[in-house]
Image (cartoon, rainbow, N blue to C red):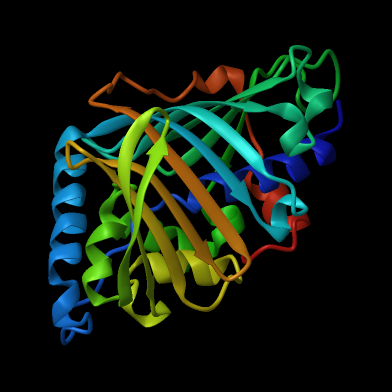
Amino acid sequence: MKAGKAAAGVTAALFVTVGAVGCTASPVAKQAADSAEVLVAALSQASDEASKAGSANIDMTVTSPDTGGRPVSMKGVYSWGNGLAMETEMPAKDLQMEELVTDGTITMRLVDGAYYYGVDPAETGPLKGKTWLKLEASAVLGEAGAAGMSRGEADPTAGLKSLKFARGVTKVGTEDVNGKKAVHYHASVPADKLGDAAAVYNALGTGGELVADVWVDDKGMPARMKQTFGTTTVSMDFLSFGVARAITAPAAGDTADMTEMVKKGSGGPA
């Protein structure tokens, strides 16, 4: 196992989770057409109900130039009731981290603004005996991007509220999502209306507008969200809500902090 290989894999993995940060819009004049008011109200209600749930089981996929154009997937728990936290399983091959585990799976945790990746302990080298790799968000997003991430609402559904400022909110139709009937909505939001989330996306170099597709089930809850910003696309299925459990940082003695290595070697923002 080589530390440089680990740093490269961890850098790629970070892009999987930042795309799920909720975006909140600044107060501006209403831009949606009057005929879209009912559609916007449905999306706002879905956002409110999901926010109250505080957590969800998710199935998520990210495609980005920073992942080599390959879809990177994860499944697990996303919690936002008491601060943003995640615990998911990810295929090691998606992250080019096959050398770090024998079972082909990486466990990732997000706790207090830091990402942790479960790996097999190395017998020698700088990672000897360590079973977790740590990366602060600032290593890739820079200080401004990391600050924007922490300031934004810690809720992956918060972006639904920004759609009331979107251009051309439309109802696409009713579709099947994981065995449930759901209404498909489509809209786009200018980058300057994304609030704190804009700093995160800009740090990733993914300029442009946010193009959003949202599927709302018959209980008024989001069943699926797909967001494209620049060259990055994030798709998230909400399999169930209200599943929170305690997600904690690994013990310090089991953890190797990769933050400075990635800052110096990844070419990302400082």
Residue at x 74%, y 12% (from the top left corner): 103
Residue furthest toward the bottom? 29
Q: In the rendered image, which quarter contains the N terminus?
A: top right
Q: Is residue 259 above or below residue 42?
A: above
In the shown orientation, is residue 46 left or right of residue 115?
left
Q: Is residue 229 above or below residue 265?
A: below
Residue 29: image x %, image y %? 16, 87
Nearer to us in this view, 170 or 146? 170
Residue at x 48%, y 40% (from the top left corner): 114
Nearer to us in this view, 260 or 104? 104
In the shown orientation, is residue 267 left or right of residue 220?
right
Nearer to us in this view, 39 or 207? 39
* Residue 102 in which image quadrant: top right
Nearer to us in this view, 40 or 244? 40
Is residue 147 in view? no
In the shown orientation, is residue 34 left or right of residue 268?
left
Residue at x 63%, y 66% (from the top left corner): 231
Residue 54: image x %, image y %? 22, 34
Residue 33: image x %, image y %? 20, 82
Total numbered badges shown on the rendered structure: 0
* Residue 170 in which image quadrant: bottom left
Residue 259: image x %, image y %? 62, 45
Q: In the rendered image, which quarter contains the C terminus?
A: bottom right
